[in-house]
Amino acid sequence: MGLHSLRHLYGSLLADGAYSLADVTRRMPHKNNTTTLDIYTHLDSVTRRKPG
């Protein structure tokens, strides 16, 4: 696993965990919340998709 993959995993886990959007944005660091939402919240929609 490369450094970029680890960064993406870290950001995705933060976004899916108990951290606020502002905290994730600050930790990654991004200029705004929209960037964080676009990049790291995709797992939320995939993991909550109903089977079938």
Image (tube, grey):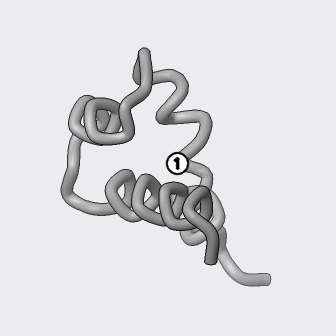
Left or right of 49 in this view: 29 = left
Residue beneath the point at 48% across and 34% down: 36
- Work out whether 21 lies above or below 7: above
Could you tell me residue 30's position as x and y percent? 43, 26
Give how far across and how far down residue 11 sits, in percent: 43, 53
Q: How many marks on residues?
A: 1
Which one is nearer the viewer's eye here, 15 or 8?
8
Residue in view at x 22 percent, y 37 percent: 23
Residue at 23%, 41% (x, y): give it.
Answer: 20
Looking at the image, residue 17 lies above or below residue 23: below
Image quadrant in which the C terminus is located: bottom right
Residue 47, quarter of picture: bottom right
Direction from residue 1 to residue 12 in the image, left or right: left
Q: Residue furthest top?
A: 31
Task: State the residue lying farthest toward the front.
Answer: 3
Are there few (<14), some (14-19), or many (20+) residues within 10 Å of tag 1?
some
User: Residue furthest toward the right?
Assistant: 52
Quadrant showing the N terminus: bottom right
Residue 15's place in the image compared with 32, above or below, is below
Q: Is residue 51 left or right of residue 34?
A: right
Q: Secondary structure at mark 1?
A: loop
Camera-side residue of 17 and 11: 11
Q: Amino acid at mark 1?
A: Thr
Q: Which residue is mark 1?
A: 41
Residue lying furthest bottom:
52
Figure check: 3 above or below 1:
above
Q: Quadrant of the rendered structure where residue 45 is?
A: bottom right
